[in-house]
Image (cartoon, grey):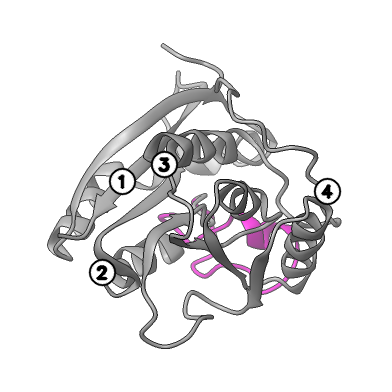
Amino acid sequence: MTTTVPRPVDLGTVWTLPGVYAPQADTFLLARALVTEGVAPGTDVLDLCTGSGALAVLAARMGARVRATDISWRAVLTARLNAARARQRVRVLHGDLSAHEHGRTFDTVVANPPYVPASAALPPRTGRARAWDAGHDGRHLVDRICARAPSLLKPRGVLLMVHSGLCGVDTTLRRLTDAGLSCAVTERTYIPFGPVLTGRLPWLRAQGLIGPDEDREELVVVRAERS
């Protein structure tokens, strides 16, 4: 069983403002999936929940025309600065999942949304936890992305989304299939619980999301393609 994520993808030096999600194991797993998928020069890429902008900059380095969105102004500024430092053209927009021209579609959509189950029913509106807390089941943003994906993708377009096994991999596959996409898990790894999960282990175990002997978190990348 893999316990660490190999880091064959060079994301370069990524700078983050305080409170902005810095690249971690899920970022590197999604980056590996993006490189494996391949991005042809001139293709259109959308990076949802861009955070530091690391994945958007990676796609731009591969030759894509890239747009990125985030609900956090600090993340937007961070992503813009990282794109400028890397001398890559990335248009970073502030807003929710719909922060782009109505009706525009993309060849590739990458998403690393908040996905950690939390005791609060709704995600926080401010603070650092906004980058990871996603409601009781961790699916507040994941479900919205599943529903929006068909309208964001060109024919043969691909969604690559990373999230934790705690918020239900089979549920994601079912929702994307019901939305008319062909989907599968293409990347998977297991990592030790980080500070966030460690701090809420009693609650997670009380909810039946983590067994009494579990000490690792599963991370997956789900690939979904529009026909």
Going from the N terminus, do you reach mark 2 or mark 1 first?
2
Q: CA gap, disc 2 to disc 1?
A: 13 Å
The residue lying furthest to the top in this view is 1
Kindly identify which residue carries mark 2: 150
The mark found on residue 90 in the picture is none
Please tell me whether residue 112 is drawn above or below residue 200 in the rendered image: below
Position of residue 209 in the picture relative to residue 114 (left or right):
left
Residue drawn 54% across the image and 77% down it: 96
**Mark 2 element type:** helix
The residue lying furthest to the front in this view is 41
Judge the density around disc 2: few (<14), some (14-19), many (≥20) Cα neighbours within 10 Å.
many
- Numbered range of the magenta stretch: 117-138
Kindly identify which residue carries mark 4: 15
Judge the density around disc 1: few (<14), some (14-19), many (≥20) Cα neighbours within 10 Å.
many
**Mark 4 element type:** loop
Q: CA gap, disc 4 to disc 3?
A: 25 Å
Residue drawn 69% across the image and 35% down it: 195
**Mark 3 element type:** loop
Q: Label 2 amino acid?
A: Pro
The mark found on residue 223 in the picture is 1
Q: CA gap, disc 4 to disc 1?
A: 28 Å
Q: Nearer the viewer, residue 38 or 20?
A: 38
Residue drawn 45% across the image and 18% down it: 213
Kindly identify which residue carries mark 3: 38
